[in-house]
Amino acid sequence: MLDAIDKELLKAVADLEGIPKGAYNIRKNGELLGREVSANITIEANEAGNGIVVRIQPGTVNESVHIPVIVSQAGLHDVVYNRFIIGASSDVTIVAGCGIHCGSSQSQGHEGIHEFRVEKGARVRYVEKHVALGEGKGKRALNPTTQVFLAEDAYAEMELSQLGGVDEADRTNTAELSAGSSLLITERVMTDDVETAISRNEIVLAGEDSKANLISRSVIRGESRQDFYATIDARARCFGHIECDAILMGNGSNETVPSLKARHPEAELTHEASIGKIADEQLVKLMSLGLTYDEAVNRIIQGFLK
Amino acid sequence: MLAIKDVMFSVPDADASVANARKTIIDPLSYTFEPGKFYAITGPNGSGKTTLAKLIMGIYEVTSGSIYLEGKDITSMGITERARAGIAYSFQHPARFKGTTFRDLLSIAAGTEEEESLAKIVARVGICSLDFLDKPVDAKLSGGEIKKVELATTIARNPKVAIYDEPDTGIDLWTIDPMVQLLKKEQDTYGTTTIVVSHNRVFLAAADTLLLIKGGRIAYEGDLEGASVLLTDLSVCGYGDVCEGESDVRCYR
């Protein structure tokens, strides 16, 4: 059922050696390749037939759902609308990701719109990796949208990464937080050559004592460009923090625009942003431990994107 | 044996009225550090102590002169080669990294990721606990904590020559004595040639030889007692933070 390219992509995006255990839905070239549900997790096609609805029963703990997408067909632009309903007081991990294998000169792409409804007191960890492989010269594009709605006291942790080969990425993350809920987003993006990546983030802290922490780490190699826009809109007593760091290597460019909006007197918002080359003192330190210059650069980047 | 022969170091002088003027930081200086001995280098701010230490590690290139390690000319070697040849350096203001842990640095320094080996080094250093290993070496570490990380990574190199630039910066008072004991123990057990740049009397007293640097030259070589008259003159200065930078070294007193 899985060929060598599929396996390579699945390994890259979902750390899977083959078909995962537990609930999963694997989509290949716009069609369903395999699906498994569990007693507590159901996966169904949506009404429009252009995506899935994943329902996690209230109270489900220590379960995971894998929903990788692979695109290896030349010229295919796959668009999906997936919804995740994470029942109250559950605690689950969702592993998504898209791997493109481009073997031709035709462009290929994937646009995934993921909506998360995290119900009262539920906790979800969402891991999403984007990778493009293959010798083909066709443009590989990935334009994901993630919309998160956190109910009271819900918690979501989102690890979003794109570590190479994607020519064009335009990501939008939005979130709305109810009272007592928390959101941690960590985004790691590495671009090279003439790749471009844009990340747009809009977080609304609507409920009292809601918390959001948005961390972005960018490595910009070659002539590539990455832009990062983040807004935290605080409408209640809440806490929000944006931390965005970009390392420039080669002739890459970056625009980073963190924006904080306090619409409540007890909102507490902070941000730190940095753009620059690898600090000399870091390189000198690692070289004084016996690494060469290149080895030192690699170790610093590895750590930064870890 | 580490020998410095006629080493001179100058930098462009931004304050001079003449174009291309240069400012001498280290006047031609020669000195031989005997193997297995403990040296303390002290002197006024801006006198060239840290510069001398960085010239030995290869962080700065000498303007003229030569440096020899065990008879081999290492003047043209870069930092990496000197590190591999057996010189280790503990920075006064250690670098902080996002995402790199103490374990990562220690593994690089020791050349192994083996838990047992790392635990042995942590035990050998003795001033930080094992659960410290997975802490990121980032801005959240306190000044004292990062200096302990720095000390551990230096010792993990098993160096022939260990250079410590102001190892007590940010260290609490009750950790300084154990730190001196640790450096003495390293010297005794492994025959490490130890060079400590410091203003702290405890280090100066612990050294076999004290070198007082003034104006880029060795103004005194001997024990602490003999240096006391000269040192009294330099005893109090509150400008250390502003004058001992990387690029703009001068005395603001």
Image (spheres, rainbow, N blue to C red):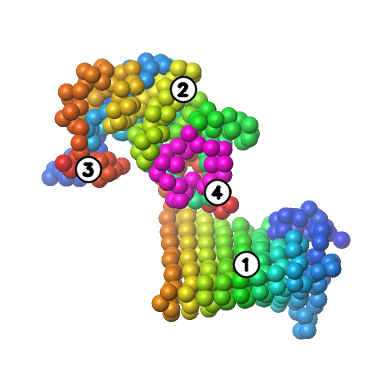
The local crowd at label 3, few if under 14, some if 14 to 19, many if 20 or more residues have their Cα within 10 Å, is few
Q: Which residue is mark 3?
A: B239
Q: Which residues are magenta?
A: B127-149
Residue B224 is left or right of residue B55, and the answer is: left
The residue that disc 4 covers is A303
Q: Are marks 3 and 4 on the same chain?
A: no
Q: Secondary structure at mark 1?
A: strand
Q: Amino acid at mark 3?
A: Tyr
Image coordinates of residue B47 in percent, x first then y, are: 23, 32
Q: Spatial distance from mark 1 to mark 2, Cα to Cα? A: 49 Å
Kindly identify which chain the residue marked by label 4 belongs to.
Answer: A
Between the C-alphas of marks 1 and 4, the distance is 24 Å
- SS class, disc 4: helix
Q: Which residue is mark 1?
A: A156
Instruction: Report the front residue among A10 and B46.
Output: B46
* Amino acid on which the number 2 mark rests in the picture: Glu
Relative horizontal placement of residue B197, taking residue A109 as reference (left or right): left
Quadrant into which the N terminus of chain A falls: bottom right
- Residue beneath the point at 48% across and 77% down: A236
What number of labels is visible?
A: 4
